[in-house]
Amino acid sequence: MKTTILSACLIFLLTLSIGYAQKSKDTELFSGDKPVTLKIAFSIRDVKKQTVDTIFTNTMMSFQTADGNWDSIKIDLRARGNFRRKNCFFPPLRIRMKKKDTDGTLFAGNKSLKLVVPCQNAKTSSDLIIKEYLAYQLYEPVTPYHFNTRLVNLTLIDQSAKQPKAYTMKAFFIEDDDLVAKRFKGKIYEDPNFHPVRLRDTAAVINDFFHYMIANTDWSAMAQHNMKIMQVNNAEYIPLPYDFDMSGLVSAPYAQVSEQLPISSVRERLYRGFCRPEPIFQYVRQLYLDKEGEIMSQITSLQSELNPKETPGIQKYLGEFFTILKNDKSFKDNIYSKCRTK
């Protein structure tokens, strides 16, 4: 890769502007790595039936403390996500809590959380959840602008019938948008007419490479679909991606590809980012190559949570992405020349 003096200066400036701001201390919930053990009881049928986002169901959430004892807090919850609400047995959840109830507990500092749960009660459900959780971990080495997550060992007690039924599963928490924004002294920006070219160049391309790496096409900065936009420094916009269950990395049985895209499988990679100056592409390309070891180590760190048969396939799949980056022609053919102009 040859770089002119001008390009080198631009890359240096990009390095300064990428925004690796110092993070304020995370809440206790997102400071640890050990899975949180939870119990929640509610009627799945009733929660899925309620489609008004402002109506929540009241219940209790019990959790195991660091000393092995149990504590509980009052919570409100509702289903989120139109697709999973219609097609899954377990709906992903939005949990809301009051400060007076969380003070002095593991959940202090959190007013709202997303709880990602399996779609179905199947043998492969835990692996699918861990692979989606892994996607969040893969993004962390390349940018500070990400949602914090925490694994959960969940017992969900369905009260839909007269005789409650308990399900045990893997799940994970995603922190609230406002906590990410607070960390960077910014705010979540909502504009139905937002155009992706307004995103900070480097942050946008880092995000675009990430989606290509995990083969995710179920996102849109323009529609703000599975993505929040964070405004920092009054005039800069940063993408915050989430919900990766439709990606090729996860390869969920229900995953679909839009008929408008020129691919037929979620396992096929398609670059969907907008065009930016070539030095930015080359900078982000090198960033990912420099972080390859750290990215791949995220897989190893979750081996104990995954079916042993899954790990080699994940390593091979992500390895294909880095093979593309390492070859000039492959990089140009699959990424740089595929960027969108409209």
Image: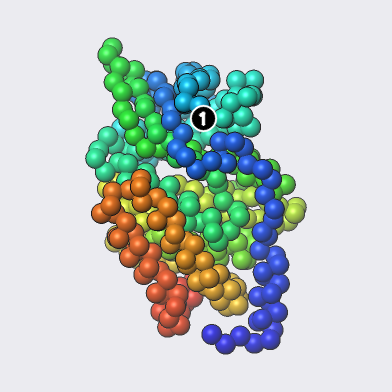
Q: Residue furthest front?
A: 67
Q: Quarter-wise, where is residue 10 in the image?
A: bottom right
- Left or right placement of residue 195 versus residue 83 in this view: right
Q: Is residue 284 left or right of residue 83?
A: right
Residue 70 or residue 102, whichever sits in front: 70
Q: Position of residue 82 (x, y in %)?
A: 41, 38
Residue at the (32%, 41%) spot, across then down: 126
Q: If the image is split into quadrants, where does the N terminus sit?
A: bottom right
Q: Quadrant of residue 110?
A: top right
Is 256 positioned to the left or the right of 137 in the image? left
Q: Quadrant of residue 263?
A: bottom left
- The residue depicted at 57 percent of the width and 30 percent of the height is 107
What is the residue that sits farthest to the top in this orientation?
162
Residue 154: x and y in percent read 39, 31
Residue 181 in view (yes/no): yes
Label 1, residues with CA under 10 Å away: few <14, some 14-19, many ≥20? few
**Left or right placement of residue 2 versus residue 130 in this view:** right
Disc 1 residue type?
Answer: Ala
Which is nearer the eye, 257 or 205? 205
Expressed as whole percent of the image width and height from the top left, the position of residue 321 reads: 40, 69
The answer to whether residue 340 is seen in the rendering is no
Residue at the spot 62% in from the left edge and 66% down from the top edge: 201
User: Going 67% across and 49% down the picture, which residue do you hit?
Assistant: 23
| Secondary-structure class at tag 1 | loop
Taking 187 as reference, is 329 above or below it?
below
Tell me the residue that label 1 is attached to: 66
